[in-house]
Image: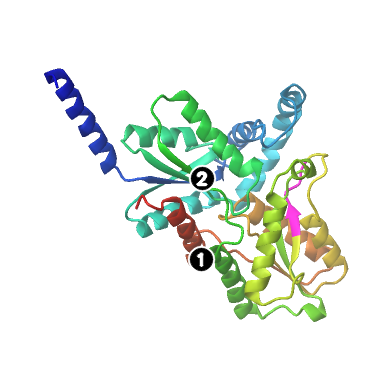
């Protein structure tokens, strides 16, 4: 071997040794949030979110005039008001709790570094991958904070990762985690949240009309008919939760929320269910949202404010929103279970 070849081999060995020393990274990804509850930041967030072809499966030639000419002119002020109603001293609830989840996961996973990324807004997936790569990390596991798989949530995260790969010559050993609709720790977290709630207020009496509603974010029916596994995974979650709670099949009422636009969406709609239950003088309803690992606009404003108001004003009795995620022991344990799968063999 020549001196130059020997030097090159030594350098290559040194580089790989340095790469081998870097801890693998787990990137916990959630949807994202405006940076402030004001029209400007909300407009920027909505523009990025609603420009994603995985979210709005319409020709950009048709959709962009609607988005720019109507939605982004009208909606930001209204949506900003909703964000203000849930904003914390720490900022966005979704951002705060996702960061807390990552911090607590890091304490449980000493062999890996845990980072937070958002599909829309900051810190973006691309910026986090840029930083990890610059710091010598070469093993990365992407963990979407979505227990149920949908193209508009998990697949679009994969798209963003693929875009980063397309911009770079040197990449990562990469793992893309899927979903966990009936994972043991996840179902245990949901069940424990309900059981602790029932310890405080009493178990619901289904015979007298009490209801437990399990509300998931909806998707357009067209996405479901195109083969999206989301509805099946939501059903899987409900069945597993009923089994864990010792309830007969069908005891829990599954509904779908956050519908917008004129397309047909998966139903029944949560808010319509609340109106019907209220009109029927339902004495009590408990609502849990298994698809949201961290509280956000959809849980704190849409469910705990708008749906509560709808139920009570229609004539219903007690309304209880049952939080389960955030920085709770159960939520972190469920993420830890998935993280260990995603990082298997690396830590």
Circle 1 is placed at which residue position? Answer: 330
Mark 1 and mark 2 residues within 8 Å of each other at the beta carbon: no
Expressed as whole percent of the image width and height from the top left, the position of residue 112 reads 35, 50
Label 2: element kind: strand
Q: Disc 1 versus disc 2: distance between alpha carbons?
A: 18 Å
User: What residue do we see at 53% from left, 52% from top?
Assistant: 88
Q: Is residue 113 left or right of residue 201?
A: left
Against 345, is 45 above or below? above
User: What residue do we see at 36% from left, 56% from top?
Assistant: 109
Q: Which residues are magenta?
A: 255-260
Against 146, is 40 above or below? above
Q: Is residue 95 left or right of residue 8?
A: right
Circle 2 is placed at which residue position? Answer: 29
Expressed as whole percent of the image width and height from the top left, the position of residue 320 reads 68, 68
Label 1: element kind: helix
Within 10 Å of the Cα at label 1, are there few (<14), some (14-19), or many (20+) other Cα atoms?
A: many
- Residue located farthest toward the right when viewing the structure as drawn: 280
User: Is residue 338 magenta-colored?
Assistant: no
Q: Of marks 1 and 2, which one's residue comes earlier in the chain?
A: 2
Dividing the picture into quadrants, the one containing residue 288 is: bottom right
User: What residue do we see at 52% from left, 29% from top?
Assistant: 163
- Residue 122 visible in the current orientation: yes
Dividing the picture into quadrants, the one containing residue 135 is: top left
Expressed as whole percent of the image width and height from the top left, the position of residue 263 reads 82, 40
């Amino acid at each position: 071997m020549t001196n130059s070849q020997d030097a090159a081999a030594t350098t290559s060995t040194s580089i790989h040794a340095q790469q081998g020393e870097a801890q693998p990274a787990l990137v916990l990804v959630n949807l994202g949030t405006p940076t402030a509850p004001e029209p400007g930041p909300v407009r920027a967030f909505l523009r990025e979110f609603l420009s994603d072809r995985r979210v709005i499966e319409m020709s950009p030639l048709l959709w962009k005039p609607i988005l720019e000419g109507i939605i982004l002119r009208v909606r930001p002020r209204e949506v900003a008001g909703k964000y203000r109603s849930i904003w914390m001293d720490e900022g966005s609830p979704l951002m705060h709790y996702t960061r807390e989840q990552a911090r607590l996961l890091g304490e449980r996973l000493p062999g890996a570094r845990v980072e937070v990324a958002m599909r829309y807004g900051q810190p973006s997936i691309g910026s986090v991958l840029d930083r990890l790569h610059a710091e010598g990390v070469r093993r990365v596991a992407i963990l979407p904070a979505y227990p149920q798989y949908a193209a508009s949530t998990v697949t679009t995260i994969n798209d963003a990762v693929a875009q980063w790969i397309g911009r770079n010559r040197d990449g990562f050993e990469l793992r893309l985690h899927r979903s966990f609709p009936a994972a043991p720790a996840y179902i245990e977290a949901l069940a424990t949240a309900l059981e602790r709630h029932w310890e405080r207020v009493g178990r619901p009496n289904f015979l007298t009309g009490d209801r437990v509603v399990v509300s998931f974010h909806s998707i357009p029916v067209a996405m479901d008919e195109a083969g999206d596994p989301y509805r099946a995974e939501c059903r899987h979650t409900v069945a597993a939760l009923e089994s864990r709670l010792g309830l007969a099949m069908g005891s829990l009422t599954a509904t779908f929320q956050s519908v917008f636009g004129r397309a047909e969406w998966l139903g029944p709609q949560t808010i319509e269910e609340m109106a019907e239950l209220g009109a029927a003088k339902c004495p009590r309803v408990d609502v849990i949202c298994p698809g949201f690992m961290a509280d956000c606009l959809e849980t704190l404003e849409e469910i705990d404010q708008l749906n509560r108001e709808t139920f009570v004003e229609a004539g219903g009795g007690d309304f209880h929103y049952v939080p389960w995620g955030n920085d709770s022991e159960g939520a972190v344990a469920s993420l830890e279970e998935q993280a260990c799968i995603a990082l298997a063999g690396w830590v």
